[in-house]
Image (tube, grey):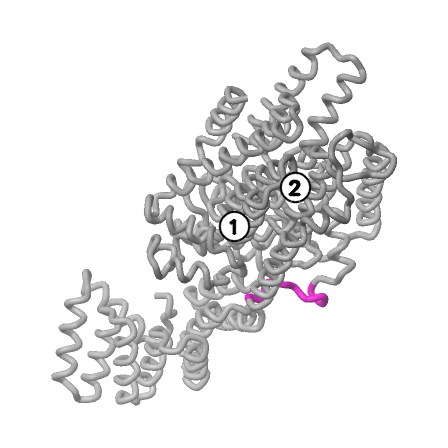
Amino acid sequence: MLLLGLLLAITTLAVYNSVAYHSFINFDDDRYVTNNSHIREGLSLHTIGWAFTSVHEGYWIPLTWLSHALDLQLFGLNSAGHHSMNLLFHTLNVILLLIVLWKATGAVGRSLAVTALFALHPLQVEAVAWIAQRKTLLSMTFFLLAILLYQRHARKPRLSFYLSVVILSACGLMAKPMVITLPFVLLLWDYWPLQRIRISGQTSGNQELSPAKLLLEKLPLFGISAVSAAITVKAQSVGGAVRSVTEAPLSLRLGNAALSYCEYLKKVFVPWRLAAIYPYPASVLASSAIAAFAVLIAITLAVFWLRRNRFLLVGWLFFLGALVPMIGLVQVGGVAMADHFAYLPSIGIFIMISFGAADLARRWHFHKAVLPVLAFTWLAGLAAVTHHQIAYWQNSVTLWSHTVSVTKDNFVAEDNLGLAYVLDNNIDGAIPHFRAAVEIKPEDPVGNLNVAVFEQQHGHLDDAIGHYNVVLHNTPDPAMKASALADLGSAYRSQRDYVLARQSYEKVLQFTPGSPAALVGLGLVSQDTGNFKDAVNYYSSAMKAQPTDVGYLLLAGALRANGQLTQATLAEQQASQLSSDLGRALQIADQLRSAGASSRN
């Protein structure tokens, strides 16, 4: 087993090796790492305190935050280090899963087959290649350690073993709430492979307990899972991520859940056209939903009928149950499903496949070489597809280009591809994707904001103002509202509508008090209308909040116009000290004074 585990670990590292050369991507990696000011401090006391008190991104996941902070401490913003840590966690999970299955079943070949599928299947790529999914990998580590300790407790009950299971469960929940299914999985594990549940008419020869006693044994675990679930729902609701029944009716959620279960199943056997985001459907055909439910019910009835093969029933219920928190009955965000959601639940299907194939081979008297050859061939094919899928995660452009090509009406992918081109200073490449996003979803705030800026910069002010107003009516994000209002103020100022321009800038201050962009905008409007005293006050306030060479040049101009020549000279000196290119700063200041420049300039 040591040699087999080592071989599988080396194979996993080899297949995934290229992730070390990948970049951060522009989807959650920024919020979790690159633009997260708390994480960028590294493992400081402030970061530790923040990690345990924050529900940033709608989760209470202090151990995940500390994991990212440690990476920053060790590697800075070198993405290779962060990716390598993800890969090491996945490899550790592979080894732990092999040990768990081997210790529980004693079946070397079958345990190895399940683990190899888990290690090399393309569905797992997203969890490993996406730095922001550290939470999935880390929670899985605690999940598997908890099962390993539980197995020891089941064979030789001890309070220390049980308390270790409880502690590991809590640690898993502090990495990602998906571990709330652990007590349910342990009940399944009692049925098989541990065979601790006393079932009428069935006996395993082992010391068995009644279902009631085993359920009572799990009550502390159910309790902490319930607390974690309540915290998560509350945090997601506060963040505005939980969709209402108006936005996503129960019928739509149920239909999407059934279709998603079937889609995950399909991708286990045909892992093709995998995408970073699968958009949530506007509607689900009743016939498609009914067919999906029929498939799920048929499989459920079949595994109950074949329940003498306990691994089939456990594998299937493992898959169904472990996916419940992510299947969309409580709909969070705008995705129908996600590959990383299957990282843990797929183990159930891999158990059914591996143990089922071995059982059939024994019953049908296959030659002993047939099954290993078939398994190796399938695993080799999966590894090749996985290696190919990893390449799509190389950077934001490759990832979103692929996602757009394999999904339909995916406005989020179009927006992210546009933003990726913007980061590469390829505005001409970005705009078609923002326009495509708006065409797919006319109320999309990200697409509308970027199209508005483009239209404004090209002098199409009425079109720009229309798009800005769409953003303001549809985004819940205060920062995005503030950005749209600041640019809207610039557009109104270009039209010489100083009343609406002033109102726009004043609204920015309601969302972001002390905003330098809004204060500079109000200074420009005051200067345009001949109120140089107010312009001086606004510019001065902006420079206290965020001193810049351009800002001091604007202040100097207002001071001169107001007759304060000495102060104007001092402001110019401040600009000179701050500037690395004073000529460029003078040019930008002149552009801002001439009504029409967007605040983004």
Q: Nearer the viewer, mark 2 or mark 1?
A: 1
Q: Is residue 291 above or below residue 248?
A: above
Residue 488: quarter of image: bottom left
Q: CA gap, disc 2 to disc 1?
A: 19 Å
Residue under label 2: 345
**Residue 440 seen in this snapshot:** no
For residue 547, side relative to residue 348 (left or right): left
Residue 15 counted in the magenta span: no
Q: Amino acid at mark 2?
A: Pro
Q: Nearer the viewer, residue 217 or 123?
A: 217
Q: Is residue 8 above or below residue 595?
A: above
Q: Secondary structure at mark 1?
A: helix
Quadrant of image for the C terminus: bottom left
Q: Residue at x 55, y 40 (%)?
A: 145
Question: How dense is the environment of label 2, judged by Cα within 10 Å: few (below 14), some, or many (20 and up)?
Answer: many
Q: Is residue 14 above or below residue 272?
A: above
Q: Main secondary structure of the magenta part?
A: loop
Magenta residue span: 239-247
Q: Which mark is residue 584?
A: none
> Where is residue 244 drawn, in percent x and y?
68, 66
Residue under label 1: 171
Quadrant of image for the N terminus: top right
Chain-order first, disc 2 or disc 1: 1
Question: How dense is the environment of label 1, judged by Cα within 10 Å: few (below 14), some, or many (20 and up)?
Answer: many
Q: Secondary structure at mark 2?
A: loop
